[in-house]
Amino acid sequence: MVKRLLFIVPALLFLALVVYFFVALRPGYDPQTLPSAMVGRPVPSFDLPGPPAPPNYAGPPVKLGFTNRDMLGRVVLVNFFASWCVPCRIEHPVLMGLGPAASVPVVGIAYKDKAADAIGFLNEYGNPYVAIALDQSGRTGIDFGVYGVPETYVVDKRGIIRLRHVGPLTAESVAREILPLVRILNAQPR
Amino acid sequence: MIIELGHFALMLALPLALIQAVVPLVGARRRHAGMMALGDMTALAQFALIALAFAALMNAYITSDFSVANVAENSSSAKPLLYKISGVWSNHEGSMMLWVLILTIFGAAVAWFGDNLPPALKARVLSVQAMIGTGFFLFILFTSDPFLRLANPPLDGNGLNPILQDPGLAFHPPMLYLGYVGFSVAFSFAVAALIEGKVDAAWARWVRPWTLAAWCALTVGIAMGSWWAYYTLGWGGWWFWDPVENASFMPWLVGTALLHSAIVVEKRDALKSWTVLLAILAFSLSLVGTFLVRSGVLTSVHAFALDPRRGVFILILLGIAVGGSLILYAVRAPALEGGGLFAPISREGALVVNNLILATGAATVFLGTLYPLFLDAVGGPKLSVGYPFFDRTFVPLMVPLLIAVAVGPFMAWKRGDLGGALQRLWVAFGLTVLAGAVALYVTQGGPILAVGGLMLAAWVLLGALTEWVGRTRLFRIPLRDAARRAIHLPRAAHGMTLAHIGLAVTVAGIAASAWQVERIVVMKPGDDLAIAGYTLHLDRIAQAETPSYHAERADISVRAGDRAIAVLHPEKRTFPLEQMTRGETAIRTTLLADLYLALGDDDGKGGATIRAYWKPLVPFIWIGAVLMALGGLLSLSDRRLRIGAARRRVPAGAAAEPGE
């Protein structure tokens, strides 16, 4: 009898899997709110192109395209965004408020976005980034462990990921989570 | 008109599949020869119809008929012919057509070559094949119709994703599908055996060639995908533990286990229910792979256009196919056991170890792929796992497997002699230690684990060679006699040796990747870069135009010391129609190491980022995979498995294998 039960196990396991898949497919499910195993690890290496310089751009100078090495030596927020992403528009004013006045530079990686669209998005809503890069294939996003946009990473002076924030940044999360950590990291030697 | 003909052929295949799913099954139960034989005709007719439908779709691609929605979305008239053809399966709808084409090819092959099968078993196998076919015909017709017309056809199509415009990728999906779908035959045999309630040595021998063929195709398919990623993505990576890569790797692991456990069924009449389970799982995991890519449950670089409706449909198909077969398994499999005595130290014992490790490996990959979402579904803490998880779990799991691979073939059936086996391996062991010491000396201060990996590779290689030398008695009897022994060895034995050597070669390539050298610098024309004993000189960066893209092309001359050895041209291509940019890497290989160059972005001041890598032994990864597949093919050509051989078969257990 016990032996018979053993043969039912595969079917039961599969049943559990099917239930789970239905959960995963339910409307409104979003696999974006996951912290990362990458925290405490170095930023994956990347070398991403930038979009072409926007015409009639009057804001502060922006670096177009960058590599992970460009970020070494200072605390940086890496923000994955996309023009097609609605929560990114919710988050955008918070990033703008952070802007050049804040003690931390923000670099933007446009995730699976077209150059023209990403530039259009920034032209319309303003540019909070000191550097912009395009991750058209999403490969860098996968290296980071990005499940969706927006996502923000705090990276320390030595290029180690210290925090992953999933979903739109809010004024509250910036004040309570991001900026205190940035202050601590800024105080650390290189 | 031709497109409508193709559409009609596809629709006609559905009722045929329905008939084939029911009539031969009933015929087998009633022992009605005519009803059983009907399956042969319908299987061949299904193949003819789907081939016609597929040809119609391909014709629309070749003639750039943009009134067909699928063609307009995925092709354009300026593409070279090769990419017009490969464009057929570059998208969801077309790739499903390829899927069912291969399914019907296998169905027709069973009908055509299966004369030596008992009619009832053959009828049931074809019925199960037709059930799978029915599900997928419905899926295509209702959710993924490639034959839809556009009311207002555009002048030109949207083009093919530039990443896919590559000869390596043109043949990657067909090979992969040959593997995935090939396992459907093993699945059908397993389900048919459960319905019949009988699994014996003859059954194992009939399943084995189909499994081998599917396994070879899957091995090559995975290797092609990995090689393509290596030379295309520009980072020199060749495996990313991406969900879709994992989806192809899991059936491979289970299929490898199935190949080995089927031998035990054939030779020892044991492990029956386990083998049946593996046959079910190999195909189930192929279906899960199909599901993962097309449903949007997991995000991946490979993801097709996401559509939850399709996901639900495939999930229902999956539920019926896998759930149904596993329930059948739960009811029928307990009656299958029996067979010979089973000593832990024996050839069959070693094969059980192989199976346990491979199955655990597949389960680990499965867990790592779905774990993030699993935890989320049960409300647990949220975490995403990436390569760190697989490096820490899957890789250590393979160490005991690789150690055992060398020892297993020395064990005798029924009761082995572990001490005796190890005694015969002492030379191999000594050479392995020597190889490790040499590697340690040469790479002083390098990563120590990689030396361990190389030693494992050497151990597997030397073990396989020792076993082969032992069989042919090379070095112990005159060369001519040894050659005669080698010729008379069954091809399956040569196949095993070759496949195990392939495994060793791949492991060596993977282990050596730890010694790669990476330089990423901004260079201006005239600059030099030194890497791994080479000097790279950037001569110039030129612009070039072609009909489908605009290219920036660097001329980099490579010198070793004072000797100029090559000029390499990494490129960056911009595709205006698709608004995408992709790199074209330049690789100079000596087969022992690759010099790998990719052109990055220009810095706006006349310089450009150059990514240069020196990758020792990296070609071994794919050479090894090809050797494994060749080993499989060699084994497939063994007379024991040849068509009709089963009729003249010698009693199980006495076949082929000379006593060790």
Image (cartoon, coloured by chain):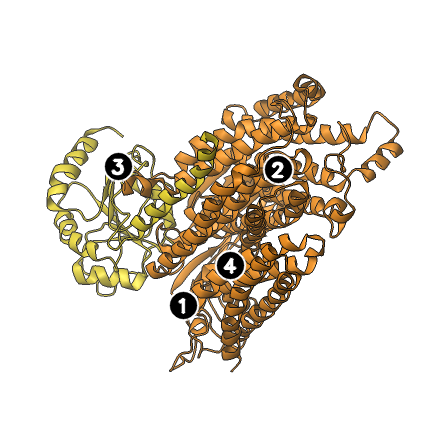
Chain colours: A yellow, B orange
Q: Which of marks 2 and 3 is nearer the N terminus?
A: 2
Q: Which of marks 4 and 1 is nearer the N terminus?
A: 4
How far apart in space, not on screen, are marks 2 and 3 (Cα)?
38 Å
Q: State whether discs 1 and 2 lie on one chain.
A: yes
Marks 1 and 2 close (CB-CB < 8 Å): no
Q: Residue B142 carries which label?
A: 1
Identity of the residue drawn at 44% across and 65% down: B138
Three-letter amino acid code at the position of disc 3: Gly
| Residue most extreme to the front | B30
Give the answer, above or below, for where B561 lies relative to B74.
above
Q: Nearer the viewer, mark 4 or mark 1?
A: 4
Three-letter amino acid code at the position of disc 1: Phe
Q: Earlier in the sequence, mark 4 or mark 3?
A: 4
Q: State whether discs 1 and 3 lie on one chain.
A: yes
- Residue B616 makes an appearance in the image: no
Residue B431 pos. (x, y %)? 67, 22
Task: Out of B462 and A50, give the one closest to the viewer.
Answer: B462
**SS class of the residue under badge 4?**
helix
Residue B167 placement: quadrant: bottom right
- How crowded pointer 3 is (Cα within 10 Å; few <14, some 14-19, many 20+) is rated as few
Q: Earlier in the sequence, mark 2 or mark 4?
A: 4
Q: Earlier in the sequence, mark 1 or mark 3?
A: 1
- How crowded pointer 2 is (Cα within 10 Å; few <14, some 14-19, many 20+) is rated as some
Task: Out of A36 and B423, give the one closest to the viewer.
Answer: B423
Q: Mark 4 lies on which chain?
A: B
How far apart in space, not on screen, are marks 2 and 4 (Cα)?
28 Å
Q: Mark 4 points at which residue?
A: B131
Residue A122 pos. (x, y %)? 21, 59
Q: Name the residue under label 2.
A: B260
Question: Does residue B175 appear left or right of residue B154 in this picture?
Answer: right
